[in-house]
Structures are given as structure tokens and as C-alpha cells.
Image (tube, grey):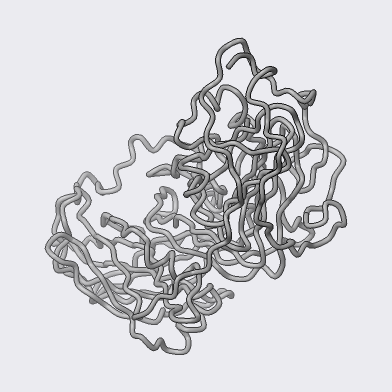
Amino acid sequence: MGNISGRRLTLATALGVVATSAVIGLGIASPAHAVCTQSTSDSPGCGSTSVPSPTPTTGVKPTDSGALPTAGPLITAAPTPSTPTPVSGAATVKGVFTLGNGKPLADATVTLTPVDEVPQDDSIITPTTVGTTKTASDGSWSFTLPSTLPSNLRSYADANGGVLSLEAYFDGSAPDGTLLTGTDYVDAGVATGSATTEGSVAARAETPSTVAIHPDVDETAVAPADSTLVDTADSASDAADTSSATSANTWQSVDGTSTAAFKPDTVNGVDYSAVQPDLGGDCLVTKHVVKKHDYYTTIGEAHAYYDTTAAFEYNNTLSSTWGIATSVDGAHWSITGKISRKNSTGHAVGFSNQGPYWAKRFQVPIEYQDVDRRTTCIGRRAKHSYSIVPVKYDIPAGGEVARYGDDVRYEDGLTPYRNSNPAYRARLDQKQYATITSGNSITYGVAAKVFGVSVSLDTEYGASHYQKITAGSGRSEHDIWGARGKISGNPGVIYSY
């Protein structure tokens, strides 16, 4: 094999490809199933049609004088979208609580409440207790929901694609009276039998999180006008990081200052990381929404190098899992646990036929809430902690239904191909395509900056949520590879050369 111009030309005989159904679009006629409003410049708005500094298409891919890596197998058919395998039995949620130093928090009371039971107005509520359980000697806990849920919990799950999102928390006091708290977020896949959903199956396969408890001494509620909660303007670069394989920072400061000196377990010179609290369960918890706002959030991407074209489809429902940001002071935040949002968007969003030499991330507007969780223990003053929670797809007044995020063409081309895992590579014949219709995307560590805090996100793929790459009729070979696995398995994102 020599130079690319003289080797590995695509096969002339077309191979059979399984066709997917047409996408129901919104708003424009060309391309047939795109929903973004077309623009005339390549600003970070949805529907940009011009390609910045394109590489000329001459029928032969750009290369250098070096030998190219070994190609992968030829893709002969697109994967058939899978249907969820029915599940049965009551859903069980799990997690682990530890002290600040990582040692197990044993025999402690864990209380579970529904995430979606938060008022939309300024009222304060006492959330419904779904159940309580105890941690084992290793700090692990589990709770099995009843087979038949109360009507309010069933309505939350039905509106969220068969998934009941729960907050699992511990509240206890150190010997000196300091409140020690920990909060986890978990999903219960409650849709079963013939009503089984992709979200319910995914929830039952979730890996339990480990959450450390920390002292909470904040007696003053953060007000919406405080600087830590001022809305910041979203830009494409704000909402998508340059390394999507990384998760959000362990600790973040919303005012941009360093968190290197922040010690979450030390208060007034006292280190509570090894302090064993009482076993909890004697505190009253109330909630109210401090602030809510729509932020454009990265939910996926698609790539098209050489003469290929890219498509991304996010159809009718949210299909993503968010890392939840929590804080005990409203200034320092960390990601603890995840919840899925599967509620309806009302229409499809996405793009198609973009390329060649094109790759961008895609964003949709999501309403986020900053929720104040007030904890009052017997004989003690109330303390405040906070969570940033995604609620629903919500188009802001005068805003776009969706938009493009960062340009990620740096992930494609010859150098990334050389550096790719050989086991993840594959080839496309002329006019053939590959579509991801199952599995998860890689984590977007900064899917959005919400009230100044970076939140993470994964997107699940299925029959109506996919990314796609289609080869043109160029003479040179169409090489693709998965970001984290085989194209035929769970590639995460399909990259292109």
C-alpha cells in the first residue's frame, strides 16, 4: 500500500444497507428533516450553512507521505434500532455513603424523595418521603420501590419516560452539633413488562455512586440576586469543553477563583472528615426554587471529513443523563450522582447532510433550577444547601429551538486517525452510511455552564436518537472509528477520515 491517492479505493459494488425511517422535522424544507433555522454565516447559531475554511474536495483525501494505519472492517449494513427488552419486578436503587475521609458511613438513615416534586413558584414544600433505608457496614445502601407506586410518583415517572428520579440524602449531627449532610441522585426504572422503556432499562443498569458527607453550617439562604447566581451569557465555547471524555471538576467555584485551597470538611479550623455523626433521621427538610433559567446544553455531535456528510437526530423526547451539581454554601460545587431526563420536547431537533470537512456539537435549551434544600434539626437552627437540577426542554422567549455548539473538526482527519485505537476502526463504501442507534455518547464534561457551574451529560441513542455519517462517491476510502468502542458496539461518537 502506498500513497492514499493510489491505494485503498472504495469498492465499486454497492452493499445492502438497512434503511432508517424518515425524521419528522420542524421548520424548514431543505434538508428535508433538519429543524434548525438556516443562517448565512457560521456563527454559533443553529443552521449555519457555510463551512469555515473548507478543505477542497478533489476526490482524494488529504494525506502526508507516511504510511497510513491499517484500516478496519467494511461496514456492510447499518445497525437495526433495538427495542427495549422487557423488564419485570420492582425497581431497586443503590448507592454508597462515606465520611469525608472515605471511610464507610455505617448504619445511617438514608431518606429518598422525588426530584420532580419541586414547586414552580416561590412556595416552600416538604417533599414526599418515598422511603427510608439504612447503610450497611461498608456504607452501601439499597431501596426497593413498591411494585405499585402512589399516583403522584407514577405521574412523575410517566412524564419522565418510565424513570422516577430520586434524591437520596443523609442528615446527621457531629457531637458538637454541626450538621453533616450528603446527597446522592439516583434513577428508578419503574416501567415494566410491555410498557418497558429504554430509560427504564438504562436506569436499572446504572452504577451506584459513592458520596461523601460534609459539614453544612450555612444559616443564611442565598438570594437570587447574589453574585453566585447571576445569569451568565451562554456561548458555544462556554457550553462545550475541548475534552468531552472528561467529567466536570470535582470542586468548582462559580466566581472563577481557585478551589485548590477549599477544604469541604474543615469549618473554623475543625476537621470533620473523620467525625462519626449520629445516625440521622430526625431533621425536617423543605425545598424551594431559588432561581430558574434556560441554558443551551450540548447533547451530542456528528462528524463528516473528506466527502462524507453528517446527521444528528434528537427526536421528541429528551434522552440524556445529567450529573447534578450540589453545594453546601452556594459558592463551591461538586457533581454528585446523576438523573435522567426523558420528558417530551414536543418535536424533533437535529441536522442532516452537513459536510464535507464539517463537525459540530449540537445544543438544546434546557430549563435548570437552583433548589434550596433547608434542613432543620431538633433544637438547632436551619441550614441551607443547594442543587442545580435539569427540569425540561424549554425554548426561551425569542430563542432558538436548538443551535450548533463548538466546532470539533480537530477530532477528525489524518492525525486523529493515526492515533485512534485500531480495534475501533471501520470503513464505509461509496454512498453507504453508519448510524449509532444504541449505547451512550461519551460524557460531555461541560455540557452547559449553569449559573456559572459546569454540569456534565451523557446522551443515550435509540430508534429515534442517533448520529449518522454517510459516504459520498469519492475515489478514496472512507475511514471512520469510534471514540470509545467499535462502530458495531458502543462507539460513543463516530469520528471521520
Residue lying at 47% horizontally and 49% vertically, measured from the top left:
489
Whether 257 is drawn above or below 293: the answer is above
Instruction: Please tell me how many numbered marks the rendered image carries.
Output: 0
x then y, percent, for residue 173: 20, 65
Residue lying at 66% horizontally and 44% vertically, measured from the top left:
469
Q: Is residue 307 left or right of residue 281?
A: right
Residue lying at 53% horizontally and 63% vertically, measured from the top left:
82
- Which quadrant of the view contains residue 67? top right
Whether 68 is drawn above or below 29: the answer is above
x then y, percent, for residue 481: 54, 37
Tell which of 457 and 122 is nearer to you.
457
Tell which of 214 and 137 is nearer to you.
137
Q: Residue furthest top?
A: 65
- Which quadrant of the view contains residue 301? top right
x then y, percent, for residue 159: 56, 77
Whether 486 is drawn above or below 195: the answer is above
Task: State whether residue 83 appears in this view.
Answer: yes
Tell which of 380 and 43 is nearer to you.
43
Q: Is residue 243 left or right of residue 134?
A: right
Q: Residue furthest front?
A: 13
Residue lying at 25% horizontally and 62% vertically, measured from the top left:
179
Task: State whether residue 53 appears in this view.
Answer: no
Quadrant placement of the C terminus: top right
Q: Is residue 305 left or right of residue 380?
A: right
Q: Is residue 328 left or right of residue 394?
A: left
x then y, percent, for residue 55: 76, 24
Quadrant placement of the N terminus: top right
